[in-house]
Image (cartoon, helix red, strand yellow):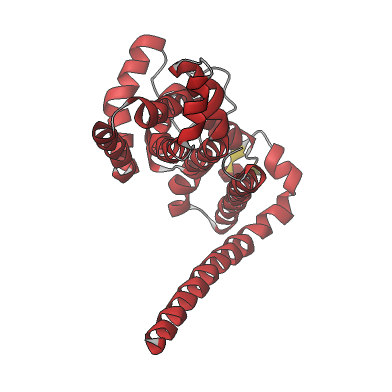
Amino acid sequence: MKTREKIIEKLIFISAVVSVAAVALITIFIFSSGMPALKETGLINFISGATWSPTNGDYGILPLIAGSLSVTIGSLILGIPLGIGCAVFIAEILDRRPARFFQSAIELLAGIPSVVYGFFGLVILVPIVRQIFGGNGFSIIAGSVILAIMILPTIVSISANSISAVPLEYREASLALGADKRQTIMKVILPAAKSGIFSSVILAMGRSIGETMAVLLITGNVAKVPGALTDSVATMTGTIAMEMSYATPAHQQALFAIGIVLFVIIMILNGTAQLIMKRFGGLS
């Protein structure tokens, strides 16, 4: 028995070491490949530059940052109320058996490849946006709607689990004091589960800003700062995926530099999620 436990402990330790080493190697590779472009262009000029034209030697990623943030914010505006509403419905309104069915159905969305979402948006959503809002349909609106659907499993799953973890005594005390079901949910349960809900939103934000294939197909890939929701935009991830195959060495270094910026943004989001979990410690 002791020998078996030691073997299991060593396997777990090896797995942890391999995981950490993989993250470290990826980080070193990205930074070593992208730092030359940042040094040559300058970090401030690289981030604040308004022109992305690698063939002309212009490496300003402000339009790409604006494109990524616009579709990410749009997806959160659509996805957060819908996701939290679904989580409340599953955890507080439905009976246990139908709740499991609905949660499983929503979680299945996470298993659909992103390229399938992209094709769905290309064939169905883009023509609808074109017909209703005008323009060519490849827009912030289309990207936001698709990303909102893609982040639903993250928000619903984590939020529903956090809501379900609120002790039954909280509900009973609220109802005993004369509050109805709606007041109990809004004033007691959601505040008690806020750490899990905040974390789900931040993780969903990371998923949204890091998505590639879906937005590559439906946002238009035009590297300019958008002025309207119907404008076509290019995202950081989409630009890397689209241009890496034909990039010259200098262009390739600039694409890796975009990866550094994206990597830092996602690390900040994940760090913020961890701080929120530690700060609120679950229920409060």
Residue 263 in the image: above or below residue 213: below
Which residue is drawn at the image coordinates 45% and 34% (left, top)?
168
Residue 120 in the image: above or below residue 36: above
Towards the viewer: 203 or 187: 187
Could you say which quadrant of the image residue 117 lies in? top left
Which residue is drawn at the image coordinates 54% and 71% (left, top)?
21
Q: Position of residue 202 (x, y in %)?
A: 55, 39
Q: Position of residue 27 (x, y in %)?
A: 59, 62
Which residue is drawn at the image coordinates 30% and 45% (left, top)?
111
Towards the viewer: 82 or 36: 82
Towards the viewer: 225 or 214: 214
Is 149 positioned to the left or the right of 200 in the image? left
| Quadrant occupied by the C terminus | top right
Which residue is drawn at the image coordinates 56% and 59% (left, top)?
249
Is 275 positioned to the left or the right of 113 in the image? right
Number of marks in the image?
0
Q: Position of residue 227 (x, y in %)?
A: 58, 19
Is 138 positioned to the left or the right of 257 in the image? left
Towards the viewer: 65 or 180: 180
Could you say which quadrant of the image residue 113 lies in? top left
| Quadrant occupied by the N terminus | bottom left
Q: Would you say residue 173 is visible in this rendering?
A: yes
Residue 283 in the image: above or below residue 93: below
Q: Position of residue 118 (x, y in %)?
A: 33, 35
